[in-house]
Amino acid sequence: MKTISLFLALINSIVAGLLLALTLSTMGIRVGEIPWFVAKFLAGASVILIGLLTWVACARAVTPGILPIAGLCLVILGAATLVWTFQRGLFTGAMEYSMAFFGGSLLVQGMTSLLGFASDSRSMAAS
């Protein structure tokens, strides 16, 4: 499970970085789009940081309580991305399959991170 989590952490961090670069490269941001811009930026940055945390956790021990919280955040973000994608596809007819795959990948990364690092019960228990 750790191997799958590491691979997905790399892929998801790269995709999140590309999405952030695409978001930041837009020429103009209207006032009504500022909350959406901030939400996308925070989500992308958190995916990259959790990916880095996953790589560090495989190399050495990290704070015990942060890995389950990070995995849970990825599961929540992945489910929210899937729901947003299908809602957008139903109401506007513009289904973005790439975002559905990204949301599913985040969901799987979070689950494999939770299950893979849970085998080390000492690293998951709060000390």
Image: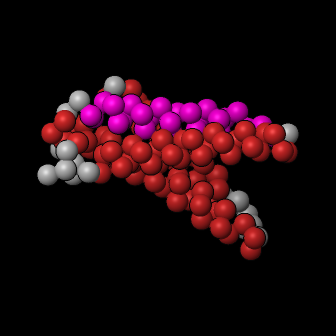
Q: Residue at coordinates 85% horizontally, 39% vertically from top-left?
A: 93
| In this rendering, position of residue 69 left or right of residue 99 | left
**Quarter occupied by the N terminus:** top left
Residue nearest the observer in this picture, 51 or 109: 109
Residue nearest the observer in this picture, 90 or 42: 90
**Observer able to see residue 35:** yes
Please provide percent x and percent y for residue 118. Answer: 27, 34
| In this rendering, position of residue 46 left or right of residue 101 | left
Which region is colored magenta?
94-118
Please provide percent x and percent y for residue 71. Answer: 39, 43
Total labels drawn: 0
Please provide percent x and percent y for residue 47. Answer: 47, 48
| In this rendering, position of residue 74 left or right of residue 70 | right
Residue 100: within the magenta? yes
Give the main secondary structure of the magenta stretch: helix
Q: Residue at coordinates 84% horizontally, 45% vertically from top-left?
A: 91
Q: Residue furthest bottom?
A: 31
Q: Residue at coordinates 75% horizontally, 43% vertically from top-left?
A: 87
Residue 29: within the magenta? no
Please provide percent x and percent y for residue 94. Answer: 82, 40
Residue nearest the observer in this picture, 125 or 96: 125
**Observer able to see residue 52:** no
Q: Above or below — where is 16 with respect to 9?
A: below
How is the protein colored in the picture?
secondary structure
Q: Residue at coordinates 51% horizontally, 46% vertically from top-left?
A: 76
